[in-house]
Amino acid sequence: MKKVRFVFLLSLSTIYYLLSTIPLAASLQQNPAAAGVEIILNSKDPGTLRLLRLTGVLNAGDWQALKPEEQKILRLAFDEQGRLTPIGQRLLQELLSARLDNPNRRPAPKAPPSGGSGLSAKTSSLFLFASVPKTAETLSAGVSQIFARTNAQPTEPPLVLPGYDWSKYPPPSLNEQPGADRPRVRLIVAPKKQIQQSRYNVHLQPNAQELTEKILLESGIDAQLLASHQARPIAALSAFNLLIIEAPYHSVRSLAQTLDIEGIYGRPANSYELTIPGNAGGAAQTTSWASWFGAGLRQGAAALGRLGAPLKTPGSPTGFQPALRESVNQLRPNKFYAQGYTGGQATVLIVDTGVDKDHPVFKGKNVIQIDLTNQKNNKDAIGHGTHVASIAAGAPEGARVSYGGVAPGTKNILAAKIFDGPNTSEDLILAGLDWGVNQTAGRKIVINLSLGGRGDPNDVLSRAANTLAHRGHAVVAAAGNSGPRANTVASPGLARDVLTIAATDKNGSITGYSSRGNPGGYKTPALQRAVYAKPDLSLPGGGASGGFGGCRFANGIVAAKSHDMPKGPCDVLIENQPLYTRMSGTSMATPHATGSTLLIFDYLEQHGGLKDSSFLESKAAQMEAAGDIKKGTKSSPKNAQGSGLQNLDRLYDLISSRMEMGLPIGNLSAEIALWTSANERRSWEISKNSAYRITRYGIVNPQNGNIINSDQELHQLISKIEAKPKGGLGGFKQWLDWKLYKWFGWNRQDGTGDPLEATG
């Protein structure tokens, strides 16, 4: 009887579903094109051109690549003469005012709507501006002023540390070690007072006692309290206002809890490891480091942190043989190069194993180094940092043009050595970042983090990376080498506002080792419903199948080899000298993206300079310009490829066109839409239960032109959708709708209104 009742309900629900799709189909047939495509594309109306450029439509091919619903939304934005309609004006102004709030903090509530218009205060003022006839010149200047006003952000406050559950300290790994072997633990502390001067490895300095007294006085930490816990300051980081304190493992919790009572919060530093490809990942690798190191295979360290597990790529053993030029050309950088943008006005920071500044690819470059490890010699015995730096900014040396990096014109290279073996600590990475940003007297820099660790979007390093991104520094991080399993992206690649990089092989396919993101996305610390996706972008990282001479990376990326490394089977001999070597991994894909960002920063420096929003905009632009990566005839999952394969030719067209029209170079609303579309269930719920449609240029309500252009608005929209009752018959209907959509592609939209407009 129950089975019959279920079948009956199922039949009724199916009939209901099919009937309910009829009005939808009819509504999509209404609203014919307001203007022909040619009229729109050839319009002389400057507002029309700005909207097209900002939504990524540069020519007829771009228009044809849009989905029918995306074409329909844009057609509604123009009248029969190809000028902006009120909906088009709203679309443009919402796109111009898009912003990404720092996910470490809860953003301010949205302003209430202005009286009578149903529009927010910012938008109504923009409508007033758009209604006055203007020339192209005055219009461009006016839009620039409005953008600066609506997108203005307050000065970024110091880093706020996440919470820590001290009841779970010490971790089992410390308890398992004999008492004599239990290490001293480093505590990351956020003092109340602002640290004025950065200092590193304080305990190793000749005047350590004097420096300790100055640091504690400056930060407001009680010296007697530290002494009673056998603790001492190790570093003071002014860029993040953090103090690094070292104490015996058994006294760390007591010290932290005492500081917490005084309103000074702290948490232990995470561990980041250099994982050996070909073995199981994790801390267990440290036991085999000595034998591996002694065998002269240091160039096999193609991944840092939790980028590990076996590097295995199924399929053909063919790959990069052997020129770096192949991987650089795969990015299509010629338009940047032809106009003279090779990275000359940009600065790169490599936080890694050091850089061999005497290698020929760095000849004539200004390489500034610091060794934050205990070695204090700036030698790159592992070779990973030298390899990475040459991919990003190495110059082709003499006739060896095959080995030039992505941004060969970059003159200034900062190198912070934070690895001298398989392991490092989070505080050393933070110190490397702090040192780098303090070297440039306020200039924006591009930071390469080909490293990773066990963490989450809320850990200290992820928060620090987000903070730097909102100050205008480009932070480019590896996704990790733990693929093909899902939800394996490493920290700080988990941080929302870093550019997180997946790896492709020579054929432009996602490698088997490249880490995948969570298919459901990740939640920002501030707004739990503002879900975002990872990774962001895919670039060449080399294959990982074995090959000739015992080299594990025979089809890997060929780049500079440090002189401090021993000879090995992966070396490439030039005039009988092992000047280059092969490596593979997302560690190699990441500096390709770093080099691309150096080209963008060079372009921007030569067109008015960089601002705090430049990196976030450039990240969005790179994601917009990327090409879809297919596996056979189907697109690779978003949690594997992100937005797709880097395409610098397309990127140059986007950036240069937008700059000429006084527009932001990246569409931040498009990035929010891409994040949302990566979660299929969330994307479906929005399009079904609201008037919004997820498009490549934003989450749009075509009825009024409103766009979800901030984390706060996305949070509000999802909150209202999730607040709808789901129990009983309503819950069953929602379940049936989802299954019919998944099985047959049927979609019945319920949403008719804009919940954000209704509530302000």
Image (spheres, grey):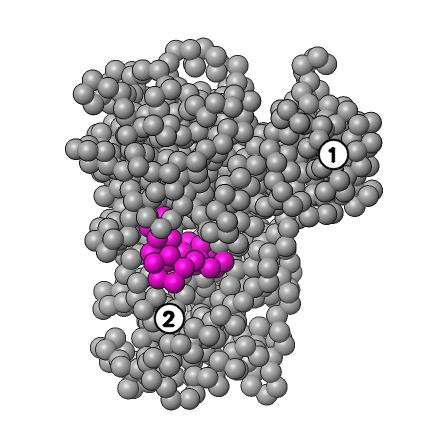
Q: Position of residue 309 (x, y in %)?
A: 45, 26
Q: Position of residue 391 (x, y in %)?
A: 32, 36
Disc 1 secondary structure class = helix
The answer to whether residue 437 shows anywhere in this view is yes
Residue 46 in magenta stretch: no
**Front residue of 186 and 60:** 186
The residue indicated by pointer 2 is 662
Predominant SS of the magenta segment: helix
Q: Quadrant of the N terminus?
A: bottom right
Residue at the (42%, 54%) spot, across then down: 619
Residue 615 in magenta stretch: yes
Disc 2 secondary structure class = loop
Residue at the (74%, 47%) spot, across then down: 192
Residue at the (29%, 17%) spot, across then down: 569
Q: In the image, is residue 375 above or below residue 167?
A: above
Looking at marks 2 and 1 on the same chain, the residue that comes earlier in the sequence is marked by: 1
**Front residue of 210 and 107:** 210
Q: What segment carries the magenta color?
A: 597-623
Tag 2: amino acid: Gly
Q: Which mark is residue 213?
A: 1
Left/right of residue 312 with respect to residue 574 in the rendered view:
right
Tag 1: amino acid: Glu
Q: Quadrant of the C terminus?
A: bottom right
Residue at the (37%, 58%) spot, across then down: 604
Quote the CA–CA distance across marks 2 and 1.
51 Å
Please tell me in which quadrant of the rendered image residue 397 appears: top left
